[in-house]
Structures are given as C-alpha cells and as structure tokens.
Amino acid sequence: MATLEIRDLHVSVDTEDGPKEILKGVDLTIRSGETHAIMGPNGSGKSTLAYSIAGHPKYTVTSGSVTLDGEDVLAMSVDERARAGLFLAMQYPVEVPGVTVSNFLRTAKTAVDGQAPKLRTWVKEVRGAMDGLRMDPAFAERNVNEGFSGGEKKRHEILQLELLKPKFAVLDETDSGLDVDALRVVSEGVNRAKATTDAGVLLITHYTRILTYIRPDFVHVFVDGRIAEEGGPELADRLEAEGYDRFVATGA
Ligand SMILES: Nc1ncnc2c1ncn2[C@@H]1O[C@H](COP(=O)(O)OP(=O)(O)OP(=O)(O)O)[C@@H](O)[C@H]1O
Ligand SMILES: [Mg+2]
C-alpha cells in the first residue's frame, strides 16, 4: 500500500510578464488501488498539476508539498520520480525522433527498474501488451510518436503504463480524441494495469464516458487552480449535465 499526498500545492509558471500563479493550494491524497478523476474547465490548471507531480522544469513550486510514502517528491529529479514509481501520460505526447518505440520502452524500463529486463520475457511482454492494445507490431520499429495519429499516441502512453508498472499514474486526457473502440481498448489497458499492480490512478478528463469504463472512487472538480468540490462518481454525471457555471459564477 502506497500513498501519494499533495498538500497546499502552489505552482507558478514563468511568463514574459513574470511568474504567474496557476495552482493556488491543491490538496489531494491518492492511495494504491484508488482511482481519482479530475474534471474542470479549460485552463483551470489540471495539466499544470500533472506536470508539477512529474517534475516538468517549466513549473515552479512556490509552496506546499508532494510526498510518496512520506518521501519528498519535489526534491527528486524527474528520473528519480519515475524510479520512485510515478508515471505521467501527457495530454500532448512529444515526438522523439531517431528513437524507436522498442528502444524507448526498453531504455525506460531499464531506467525505472535499475536493471535491464530479461530479453526473452521482455519481448513477449511487449508483444502481449501491444496485442492487448490492438497495436500493430510494426509500431515497435517506428520512432516514438513521429507521425502517430492522436489515438496512436494515446495507446503508446498506455503501453508504457502497462510495461513500466508505476505505483501511481497520472493520465492527462488520455481519452481525448479516441474513437469509441479505441476508448474501450485504452480503458481496458488502464484497468489491466490497475489489476496487476494495484496502482493508484489520477485520471484527468472532460468526459464521463471514460468513467463508465474506468470507475472512479472519487471525482474532484478543479476550478481556478484548486479543488472546488469533491464527490463520488455521481458528481461526474452532474457536471456533464450542469457544466461548471455554479463554480465559476461564485468565483470559486
Ligand atoms: N507560459 C505561460 N504563460 C501564461 N500562461 C500560462 C503559461 N503556461 C500555462 N499558462 C496558463 O496556465 C493555465 C492552466 O493551464 P493548464 O494547461 O494547466 O490547464 P488545463 O486545466 O489542463 O486546461 P485544458 O482542460 O484545456 O487542458 C492556463 O490559463 C494557461 O494559459
Ligand atoms: Mg490540460
């Protein structure tokens, strides 16, 4: 059982006019096996939270804490965070020219585990995971995300999740741009990862559809850099029906 704890997190981003505060005191606790959905209007800071947990250099934590089983995550480098068991599937995955999916996955696995995976079982595992995600084996020899369609990039993110087996996974709009079949396939991948590793999942989404496949234990409404309301799965349905007016109107 592991715990990821975010306490009163304040984060700024550097702009041409100086630093701008985006996160204004985020409190969130995720335990192994739990699924937390974060919903909220565009620009409310959801991706900023994801990047801050992962350690993106563009974001400066000005106060607050992030701990994993009591260990200070904010003091860790990006690769130390990955080794500690944190994983981020980005909203807009980046291209890595000149690096094949196959090499990328093996390098990442070696870095995260601290030792190279045994070749025979590894090759089998990669094939099995790609098969489960309905990915053509030819993808293994293509450069990471180069020319991938939106949906293919998202499958590749979940492929990493299944193979790297993190303790906590932050999935930033993994469902955006997926066709109905891909949404199901990708959701099944997340559920497989959860079932085999008991990972805690932070699922950022705009849509309730993915939440019918990946059932959240908690739903958090993110507004203007902080959590404005929390509830169970029923809160997602309410947001879909009502939108965010009542939060924005009250200046929450
Ligand atoms: N370099 C920057 N200069 C100015 N504002 C910035 C900069 N980087 C981020 N921001 C602002 O930070 C806010 C939060 O952005 P973020 O990407 O976290 O939102 P989000 O909740 O993920 O939105 P979406 O639902 O559209 O993905 C936005 O208003 C964005 O414009
Ligand atoms: Mg975002």
Image: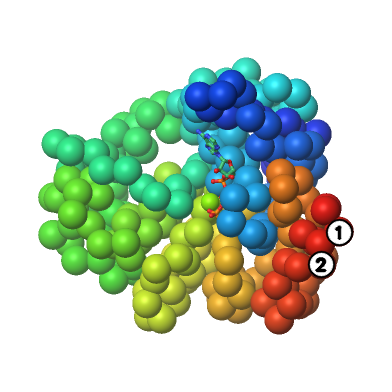
Residue at the outermost front position: 17
User: What is the distance, in whole Å, between disc 2 and disc 1 at their CAs?
Assistant: 6 Å
Q: Which residue is identified by label 1?
A: 250
Q: Is residue 5 visible?
A: no
Q: Can residue 116 be seen in this view?
A: yes
Vertical arrangement, residue 95 with respect to residue 56, above or below: below
The foreground one among 8 and 67 is 8
Residue 106 image position (x, y, % from top left): 28, 39
Q: Is residue 48 left or right of residue 27?
A: left
Q: Which amino acid lies under the numbered mark 1 shown in the image of this protein?
A: Thr
Residue 120 image position (x, y, % from top left): 23, 47
Q: Which residue is identified by label 2?
A: 246
Q: In which quarter of the image is residue 183?
A: bottom left
Q: In this view, does 205 lie to the left or right of 159?
A: right
Residue 242 image position (x, y, % from top left): 74, 77
Q: Which amino acid lies under the numbered mark 2 shown in the image of this protein?
A: Arg
Q: Quadrant of residue 105?
A: top left
Residue 180 image position (x, y, % from top left): 41, 81
Vertical arrangement, residue 92 with respect to residue 97, above or below: below
Mark 1 lies on a secondary structure that is loop
